[in-house]
Every structure is written in structure tokens, then in C-alpha cells.
Amino acid sequence: MTGFSERVKGLPFLGIGISTEYGAAETPGSLEPEELRQARPSYASFLEMGVETRKGLDSAAEAWLHKGLPCTYHFLDLNLSEPEDFDAAWMAQAAALAEHMKPAWLCGDAGLWHFGHREPAQMLLLPPILTDESASALAEGIVRLRDSLGYEVLPENPPGVAYIGDLHLLDFFARVCDRADTGMLLDCAHLAIYQRLHEHPPMTGLDGFPMERVIEVHVAGAEIREHQGFEYVEDDHSMAVLPETWLLLDQVTAQAKELRAVVLECERNSLDEAIAGFQLLEARLEDTAFGRKRARGLP
Amino acid sequence: MHHDPQFVEQVYDDRDRALADEDLGPSERLLLTQPDRRAWGADAERRQRVLSALELEFSACCAMAEQATGGRDCLLGFFSSSAFHQCVRSFQPLVFAFGRYLVGRSQEGLFGGNKVAALARLELAAAKVRRTESPSPPTEGAFGPLVMLRRAPWIELLELPEGTLQLFQAMGPRRTAAGPSQLPSLSSDTSEHLIIERAQPDGSLSIGYLPEALFTILTTAGEGVPRTALVACARAEGAEPPQDEEVLQSLESDRLLVPLSDR
């Protein structure tokens, strides 16, 4: 198969977009993707659709597709590192959804979306085990899904409060990207959470990370919480973006020459709150290669 | 460890002992105690969320257990049970482990007695049927005498104390256990035979009574017996020729008995 450095040339430039998942827009006070697109089309250039195969797509997602607007398929129910999770039923459903959606690519948190069976009571989101062996297993899953569905599969660094393993998160994903020869969805908010949890400076590990593989970036707000004196950060998708998340965004967008898409995850906020967040994001991106491409409206 | 705070304490206090049954080497055990011990419990609502998801399929027995014990602690105990840990190890659906836990604990008298045990068995059987394959289309033509027949995989048979189905239905669609004195009581010495089946074409469940003779024939069929054995079983249950053959044909046409080759 052609290497990623060649395949990346075929990936579209999507610009700034938003994310959603089944039923999100129906929650009172939540952002309606079409409402944002009508008000500020440049902040809703594409829709990242969080998909559980058993739920499918909601009416907001279907309406988006009906207009022929760009999207990405963000899976919410596949443990990439577990071969048994690629069962025939899931693969068939995912293939049918991808055929229907025609996404620019697939992406998703590369951790555990469930323990054991893919059952409602067993759904969760845990980060991967940060070991060399786990990186290989994850890479195999990415290649398998990419080969099966015919789309690029971008692993995303998940959030967490308890990480296990002897590798730094970025070293782990550098190995995953290399072994799967894939691009990456780097979530700056999740990375900031990881760095803070481990008392690392925000930029730790970025120097060894293959920034040319970053195709998509996420930004979101978070809340600092405490449990029995233990301080941790909850990835709550509010508009309270951590300062170090913005710093990471600056650093990543300065170096990620193949960046195609930036998502502000704000589906639980009002339209006015979201627009204020997008304005901050837009200003940070303005003087980057991504911002200039976006301004020209060119890939 | 995200679900069981007692287990977290055991692992951090003596990981080799706590993890003795797990397929983990010394370095992997060490990794598990890397995070701050408190981090495992940071999502304090996790167990409640999972329990709420499980309760969707065990609403009747959970409501009754909660009322009998005065809260949800009895149900949250599942996450520290061997049933839960064995389920995580063995890659089984959690609903089955939860159902077995409810049956076991209620039979021990911990959750308020025989009503909870009967309802738990009923709802566990329903959970199993929900996860079976859809009914296959009927096979063309009559079956020969030597064909191997089995009980259809999309049904479950239950022998429960008389009054169980009435109790289940009396709790209504919201499965409320308010006013236990108003709910039907269960017989302590007679039983009823129930069948739960996945109906075509929408896959919804139906629960109904089954005559004891048909219950016996379907139970005998089990995972597969020659058709002649089931005809003999029908006769033993009192069906004279040609009724014995008619009984079998009825079970076959209703897709309650299917050829073993349909598997």
C-alpha cells in the first residue's frame, strides 16, 4: 500500500468544524450544528459525527448529510487494540454507515470504549495501556480498519484520570503512528489533561512527536475537580479552555504542516457561547499555515 | 478497578495477593499501582451509571430488592462480587453476571426472599432471549422421523413459583414495587411454566404461560434429540396418536422446535 506521506495528499482540507453525537443537539441548551452553520458557516465547515453503530445517526446528522456537507466519522464503540472487537456485525454496520456518510476519514479515541462485550452497561472510555506491546496492538487495529473500510483511520489520544504504562503518551502515539503508518488526531485538551496529571510541562514529549502526521486537532474546555484531595481535570467540553490547551494548540499548529481540520468541541454550549469560543480559536489560528489556507479557502 | 473501590484497596495494599488470579506478570501488576490510588475513584458516579444501565433489564427485581433492603447498596454490592470480577475476566455480557448475582443473593434471602429470586430469573431469561439470534424462516416440508430437533435458540423456558408472571405484570411497565401488600403473592408449593420468545418480525419479546406437557417436550428437546424421541415424549404426556404427531407439528410450525441443522 502507498505510504502515508503519499496518501495524505488525497485528504481534503476541512477547516474549522464542530462535533456531535447521537441526540446531542436535542438536549436543551445544546448547540445545533445547522444553527451554527447558518450563523457562522466558517465555524461549521464540517461536522464530526460521533457514531455508535447500534444507535446510527440522528436527525441532525442526517440533515447535514442530506445537504451534501463534509463530515468525519468519529467512532465511539471500537476497541482498536482488541482483535475480537472487529466482529462481522460491527464491521458490516460501520461499512454501511461509512458508505452512507462518505466521510473525509474515520477517527476516534484510541482507547477502550467498553470492557468485554459491546453492551450499554459496559460502555466507558479509558486510555490505552501505554506500553510498546500495546502500541503494536493498536497499530494492527488501525491498519485492519483502514484496509477493511478503505478510509484513513486517525487515532485520537483519549482523556483519562488513571494512565498505566511506561511510555509517555506522545511517545506511545509516535510508535502507533509509525507502525500503522497513519495520521493522527491530536486532542490538545486531552494532552493538556495528561501533562497536568503527570506534572509535566505542557510541551513535554512534543519534540519527539512526528508532527507531520497530525491531520486533525481538537480543542475543548475542561473543569478542574477534586476527589478525596486528588485533583484531576474533567474533559467537559465547556468553553473554559485550559491555558495550556491553547499553548499546545499554538505549538502544534505552528508545526503540523499537514493539518486539515480543527474541531472546537462545544456541543453542550449555547450558540452565543460557542461563537465566542470559535472567535478565540480563529484568532489563534490566523497566523498559521492552517489559518492562511483556510483564509484562502484552498486545500 | 474503576468499578470496585474495595478491589483498589486490596491491590494497593498487596498487589501480588489481590491479583493472584489474574493473568498478569510482576511488571504488569506493578503498572496497576502507578496511578494515584484515589484516581480510580475519581468518577464517583460510574457505578451508579452502570447500575442504571443494568436496571433497565432488571427493573422489576431491582425495584423490589431496593424496597426490601431500603436502598441501592445491595445492588451496588455487585461490583465487589466474584460474579462481577469473573465476568470482566471471561468477556461475558455484564447483564448475565448481574442477573446471576441477583438470583444467587435473593435465593440466599439477602434481597427480600422468593419474589426477587423469581423476578430475577424471569428477567435474566428475557435478557438472554434479547441477545439470541433472530428466528430463522421455517424449513420447507415435513421433518422425517430421524431428524434431530432442538429447542429453538430464541426461546427460554422457565419453571417458577405460581404467580410470578402475574406479579411481574402487576408491577406495570415502570416496574414499581410500591405497596408490596398490594402485589400478588407467590405460591410456595406449586409452579407455573413460562415461555419467553423473540417474536418475528420486530424482535420484541413475548412472555406467556406454557402447558406443562409442552414445557416437558421442549425441555426434552434441549440441544437436540431425534424426532421420534419427542413423539414418544408427547405420548408419555398423554397425547395418543394422531395427537402426538399433531403436537409435534404444532411446535415445529410455531418455530419452537427447529432442526439441529438450522444451527
Image (cartoon, coloured by chain):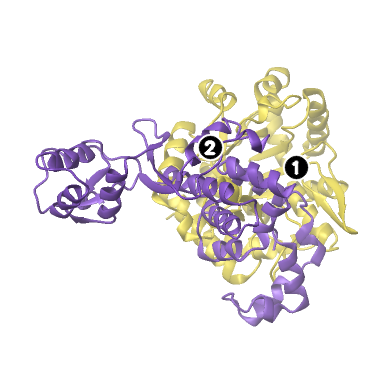
- Give neighbour class at mark 1: few <14, some 14-19, many 20+ (Cα, 10 Å): many
Q: Chain of mark 1?
A: A
- Residue B196 in the image: state x and y as whole percent: 40, 41
**Chain B drawn colour:** purple
Q: Position of residue B200 (x, y in %)?
A: 34, 32
Residue type, numbered disc 1 = Val
The quadrant of the picture occupied by the C terminus of chain A is top right
Relative side of B166 to B210, left or right: right
- Relative depth, front residue between A296 and A70: A70
Relative side of A203 to A25, left or right = right
Dot 2 alpha-carbon crowd within 10 angstroms: few under 14, some 14 to 19, many 20 or more: many
Q: Are tags 1 and 2 found on a single chain?
A: no
Q: Position of residue B49 (x, y in %)?
A: 68, 46
Front residue of this view, candidates B119 and B150: B119
Evaluate whether residue A299 shows in this view. no
Question: Residue A186: in sight, yes or no?
Answer: yes
| Residue at x-position 16% and y-position 48% | B235
Give the distance between the C-alpha atoms of the residues marked 1 and 2, in whole angstroms: 49 Å
The disc labelled 2 sits on which kind of residue? Phe
> Label 2 lies in what chain?
B
Which residue was labeled with disc 1? Answer: A219
State the quadrant of the N terminus of chain A: bottom left
Q: Which chain is yellow?
A: A
Badge 1 marks a residue whose secondary structure is strand
Q: Which residue is mark 2?
A: B168
Name the secondary structure under disc 2: helix
